[in-house]
Structures are given as structure tokens and as C-alpha cells.
Image (cartoon, helix red, strand yellow):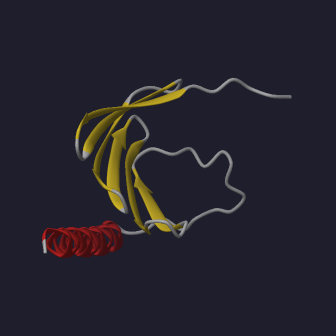
Amino acid sequence: MGSFRFYRRVSIFPGFSVNLSKSGPSLTMGVRGAHMTFGARGITKTVGIPGTGLYYTSRTGHHTGFHSAHQETPLSPEQQSSADHKAEGAMGCLLLMVIAAFFFLLGAIIR
């Protein structure tokens, strides 16, 4: 049996958008390939390689595990902090690479 879904993204300005869905609003900031979404279910960080379909997503905050078949071992606060720090570092590196590629392409177009 089917179900109705609703989703709409409204761009506020480049790099920021508001997402509206049946489950509530959320705010997304970032660029293609690296963004963070802040919503009722917590913070979702996504890093990927544009055009390939390869990406990594991590979520912090509330999730029920209702659809999960396995039981995860909880991390200590120190381990969680370390994992979050590594993910943020990876996002920062990817963001710098995207910005460098943008300026490289911009320089090639101007010449």
C-alpha cells in the first residue's frame, strides 16, 4: 500500500535552505558535497563526492532505532566527541577542496 509524502526545499540564499516536510521544518547549510542539516531529529552531517553517488552521513541527536535490526553499543562521551571531531574535520577538508576547485575553475574561465 502506498503513502503520501511531502517535501519542499526553499533556498534562503546560496549555501542555506529551509526544508519543509510532513515531519517538520529543518535548516540545511553547506555546499554540494558537504552539508549539515539541523532539525527535530538532531543534526545530520553529510560528506560526499558530487556526481558519484558516494557519500557518508552521520546523525547525532534523537533517533528511535525502530527500524534497526541490531543493537549498537553506546559510545562513551569521549569516544563520541572524538568521532564527531573526526567527522567535522573531514567536512572541513572537503569544504576546502570544493572551495579550491571553485577558484581553480574560476581562474580557468577568466583566462
Please name the residue shown 32% across and 52% down the image: 36
In the rendering, at what x and y percent does residue 31 appear? Answer: 29, 56
In the rendering, at what x and y percent does residue 70 appear? Answer: 68, 62
| Quadrant (top left/top right/bottom left/bottom right) for the N terminus | top right
Q: Quadrant of residue 71?
A: bottom right
Front one among 38 and 80: 38
Vertical side of 56 occupied by 31: above or below: above
Side of 24 relative to 2 (left or right): left
Total numbered labels placed on residues in the image? 0
Please name the residue shown 23% across and 44% down the image: 14
Vertical side of 85 occupied by 24: above or below: above
Front one among 111 and 50: 111
Front one among 107 and 7: 107
Please name the residue shown 37% across and 63% down the image: 33
Please name the residue shown 43% across and 55% down the image: 59
Vertical side of 82 occupied by 27: above or below: above
Front one among 77 and 16: 16
Side of 5 relative to 37 (left or right): right
Vertical side of 15 occupied by 93: above or below: below
In the rendering, at what x and y percent does residue 66 appear? Answer: 66, 45
| Quadrant (top left/top right/bottom left/bottom right) for the C terminus | bottom left
